[in-house]
Amino acid sequence: MTQHIVRAFDEELGVLSAKIVQMGGIAEAMLVDAVDALAKHDVAKARTVVERDAQLDEIQHIIEEQAVLLIAKRQPMANDLRHIMGTIRIASDIERIGDLVKNIGKRVTVMEDRFLSFRSMSGIQHMAHLVLQQVKAVLDSFSQNSAELAHHVWLHDGEVDTLHNALFRELLTYMMEDPRSITFATHMLFIAKNIERAGDHATNIAETVYFIETGQQLSGPRPKGESSAVAFDSQDD
Amino acid sequence: MNDVQMMTATADGTQPRVKVSARGVDVFYGEKHAIKNLTVDIPDRTVTAFIGPSGCGKSTFLRCINRMNDTIPSCRVTGRIEIDGEDIYDPVLDVVQLRARVGMVFQKPNPFPKSVFENVAYGPKIHGLARDRTELEEIVVRSLKRASLFEEVKDRLNDPGTGLSGGQQQRLCIARAIAVSPEVILMDEPCSALDPIATAKIEELIDELRSNFTIVIVTHSMQQAARVSQRTAFFHLGTLVEEGATEQIFTAPQDRRTQDYITGRFG
């Protein structure tokens, strides 16, 4: 990208992008730790996940303030304008991912550990791994200005949905077999849902990155997971 | 590309009629090739903004539309420019009549050293648009009202036009331009000598005038082009680089040069 005549403008845009990368890094680490804390029932680690969410909120505020200041000072146009507006949206998506992961952390601190041997645990870990890849890839697409990579992320959300639906059925079976597991399994259902929603936010970010880079909205058919859990999803956006 | 084409349509979905059409226009100042093979359609009752760096040819082309360049001896215009399908460079065409149809407002307000009333009455008088004093007064009042100036000057119609504030003088020039009922109004940086409040008033006025006139405005203020126009054309080095719906030009331009210019990246 050619530089602006006013060099301070480039620097200010650079600061905004750096803050997004910083937020992304925190959110990724929180997700890794949250799932790790779940698998090992590490309550102390789960608490650190909950605490770290405040950092995301703070950086998001900084991004919003700086973006507003940039718009007021520079009156950005075209790709600059899309970049700044996109940055605000991406910050808000990462902040939401942080909230969802924080909720996983909270659940771990109150869950019993006697059902931890459930096979569904590996399902959750697998889902979290996929979502983490999506989040990493979409943040790479942002920092590399790659519409192509963003498009790739956007197309690959379906796997997460499919896994989520499989987990949903599996946990229902456990609850039917052993009613004592209902509390635990319900927590697991919500955790799975949170991870799946974090994946949705990665897809939102992909759409934003694509718009920043091309000025066009991503559209067309997108592979969706199976829809067996439609009733469960109905309150979803 | 489809949505780009959609954006060129008006709100009710109809395609506006072409008012001014240029085909393969070249302009030379002596040896200097100021405009190169320009082809563009300017829609009726729409504000079209010309943007581009200094010396890009935007003002030159604007001045071709009412043959103001005829006054420059070294200037040569080739190609075809039509208004409502009529060739305006046809040798039999009456240039004075053409300039009554195509009014112009300049960068610096340039009222005649006459009264406010006489400034507006001058055009209708020389074109014989009023049969008597009453009709002339009607035209003057109507023009001042349309230029959103009447309320401010109604008690000073006999004071000199040059005694008004800069913004009022510019609105007086707009009133003078519309007094002869032109079809097209050309504006060459009409706000560059005005403060933000006076600028806002002119912009508001341009928006009102567009329901009756075809307006072409040259501006160096990108924000102004984005605010007042429906179509924007970007000129660079005598070439029309890109022309399109204003919202598209300022949010997602197709050409790299347009993007570099409007985002302040031109070297």
Image (cartoon, rainbow, N blue to C red):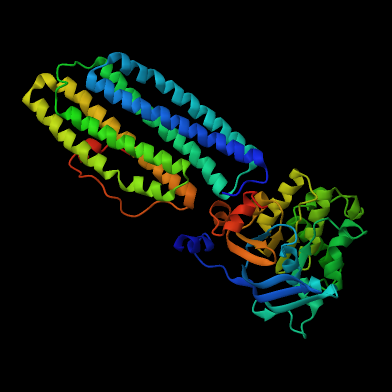
Residue A109 visible in the current orientation: yes
Answer left or right for B110 relative to A83. right
Residue placed most toward the observer, A174 or B109: A174
Q: Residue B211: x, y in percent?
A: 64, 61
Image quadrant of residue A209? top left
Instruction: Kindly identify the residue that appears in the image at 62 percent across and 70 percent down.
Output: B40
Answer left or right for A62 relative to A156. right
Instruction: Kindly identify the residue that appears in the image at 54 percent across and 40 percent down.
Output: A84
Q: Residue A222: x, y in percent?
A: 30, 50
Residue placed most toward the observer, A150 or B141: A150
Image quadrant of residue B243? bottom right
Answer left or right for A13 relative to A158. right
- Looking at this view, name the residue that lies furthest to the left: A177
Image quadrant of residue B82? bottom right
- Looking at this view, name the residue that lies furthest to the bottom: B92
Reply above or below: B38 against A218.
below
Reply above or below: A2 against A190.
below
Q: Residue B230: x, y in percent?
A: 60, 58
Reply above or below: A192 against A105.
below
Instruction: Kindly identify the residue that appears in the image at 49 percent across and 64 percent down.
Output: B5
Instruction: Kindly identify the residue that appears in the image at 71 percent across and 59 percent down.
Output: B218
Q: Residue A211: x, y in percent?
A: 46, 48
Residue B210 visible in the current orientation: no
Total residue callouts = 0
Residue placed most toward the observer, B123 or B157: B123
Residue placed most toward the observer, A13 or A193: A13
